[in-house]
Image: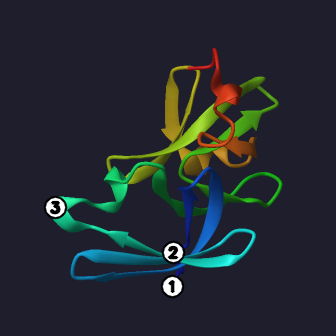
Amino acid sequence: MRVINYRAFYKGSICEVIRIDFKFDKATIEYKGKHTVVENINLKGGKCLDRIDGFKLVQNTGLKDKSGAEIYEGDIGYDNHFGCYGVVKFDEGAFIYNWVGISEDLFEATDDVEIVGNIYENPELLEGEE
């Protein structure tokens, strides 16, 4: 059985998510960046984590790039063979790799792609690519 890991883009940086607890109208998120931090997020009024400004939860795909780095939703990869960047997305129940207008199953791309950043911290890598 595979353990599902998450990262979060929150307050300007990517952090490893250690734990998320939902209780009534609050979410408690423990994450590790420079320090381990516990945030209490108010979910009153129908808010959900996806709609909190500056917060984005991203899931590990369970795959690794050609260098052995774990791949997460939102990661940006570079393909030396084609000389272009692409982005990892979750679409219709599957992880895909989008590059230069082409979408393919992420599993098919992992041997050729090296993760070089993510869409939250390095959006400039995709300028002119999509």
CB of mark 2 within 8 Å of CB of mark 3? Answer: no
How was the colour assigned to the protein in this rendering?
A: rainbow
Secondary structure beneath label 2: loop
**Displayed quadrant of residue 45:** bottom left
Query: Closer to the N terminus: mark 2 or mark 3?
Result: 2
How far separated are the C-alphas under marks 2 and 3?
29 Å
Residue drawn where x is 63% and y is 69% of the image: 16
* Lower sequence index among marks 1 and 3: 1
At x 75% / y 69%, what residue is drawn? 34
**Residue 36 placement (x, y as % from top left):** 66, 79
| Apparent side of residue 18 relative to residue 48 in the rendered image (left or right) | right
Foreground mark, 1 or 3, reads 3
Report x, y in % for residue 67: 83, 54
Q: Position of residue 25 (x, y in %)?
A: 23, 75
**Mark count:** 3
| Residue type at tag 2 | Ile
Identify the image quadrant of the C terminus. top right
Is residue 14 rendered to the left or right of residue 49?
right
Horizontally, residue 126 falls left or right of residue 52, namely right
Residue identifier under label 1? 1
Q: Nearer the viewer, mark 2 or mark 3?
A: 3
Give the residue drawn at x 64%, y 64%: 15
> Compared with residue 112, is residue 66 higher up or lower down, i.e. above or below?
below
Please give the label number shown on residue 4. 2
Q: Position of residue 117 (x, y in %)?
A: 72, 43
Q: Secondary structure at mark 3?
A: helix
Per the image, the residue denoted by label 3 is 45
